[in-house]
Amino acid sequence: MNYQTLPKIELHCHLDGSVRLSTALELALHKKLLPVDTCLEAIKEKLVVAEHCPDLPTYLQKFELPLQMMQDEETLQRIAYELLADAHAEHVKYLEIRFAPILHTRQGLSMQAVIASVLQGMADAKKDFGISSHLILCQLRHHAVDSTAALLRAGEAFLGKGVVAVDLAGAEPLGFAPVYTPFFKQAKAMGYRITIHAGETGHSQNVIDAIELLGAERIGHAVAIQHDTHAINLVRE
């Protein structure tokens, strides 16, 4: 069996973690983010996580350089397009891309413009390659809790037009879920589906809370439930 040629779906793909190395090098040099003598191998070290990564915050540091590049509409559109082109080459038939729009507003773009740019890249890839995709909007736990409302408003106009869900991601403290309960109730009422990063580190209770308090229909990672029978059964259900 040749895995490469099998038709596949991918449901957990981060936009800012999927930049081609060649594109990253081109953009970093063009935007003067790195020295002019930077080579492909050097930028790979900045973007690719080591085999033995000590913790989640260290892992998340690898997203910073791509985020510095992804602050204009053309770049956002291009990276979304290239992500899907590469997925098509691996025989992925359907893919869900997730990202945090607010991280791409550092140079003045609105969250609506950010979302629209990514959706345009996805639409262009659909036209050129036939690959289907949808977009998941992420709120980040290290941002102000009440900024979740702004994210939901920014994405509302795109529901049914490419945006399908809202997510909660980033470093994961124990007991993060309760303060987000009203926002995710609002999200569900607006028509968003709910997926939550939980149990990515050592807290199975976070997975239980994500389901019971936030209405998660899908959990990102959840490896922390491996020794928690209650959490396993809840996820299975």
Image: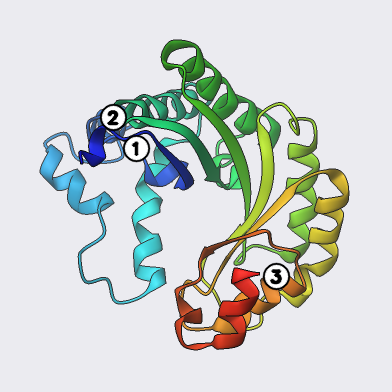
Q: Residues within 10 Å of mark 1 (few under 14, many from 20)?
A: many
Q: Quick one: which residue is furthest to the top in this view?
A: 128
Q: Nearer the viewer, residue 79 or 61?
A: 79
Q: Residue at x 55, y 82 (%)?
A: 204
Q: Tell me: 105 left or right of 200.
A: right
The image quadrant where one finds the N terminus is top left
Tag 1 and tag 2, C-beta contact below 8 Å: yes
In the rendered image, which quarter is residue 169 located in? bottom right
Q: Would residue 110 be seen by someone viewing this image from the given angle?
A: no
- State the residue position of label 2: 23
- State the residue position of label 3: 211
Q: Residues within 10 Å of mark 3 (few under 14, many from 20)?
A: many
Q: Residue at x 16, y 34 (%)?
A: 36
- State the residue position of label 1: 19
Q: Tell me: 165 left or right of 180.
A: left
Q: CA distance from mark 2 to mark 3?
A: 38 Å
Q: Residue 122's x, y, as percent?
A: 52, 24
Q: Residue 35's x, y, as percent?
A: 19, 40
Q: Tell me: 160 left or right of 141.
A: right
SS at badge 3: helix
Which label lies toward us, 1 or 3?
3
The image shows a total of numbered marks equal to 3
Which label lies toward us, 2 or 3?
3
Q: Nearer the viewer, residue 160 or 49?
A: 160
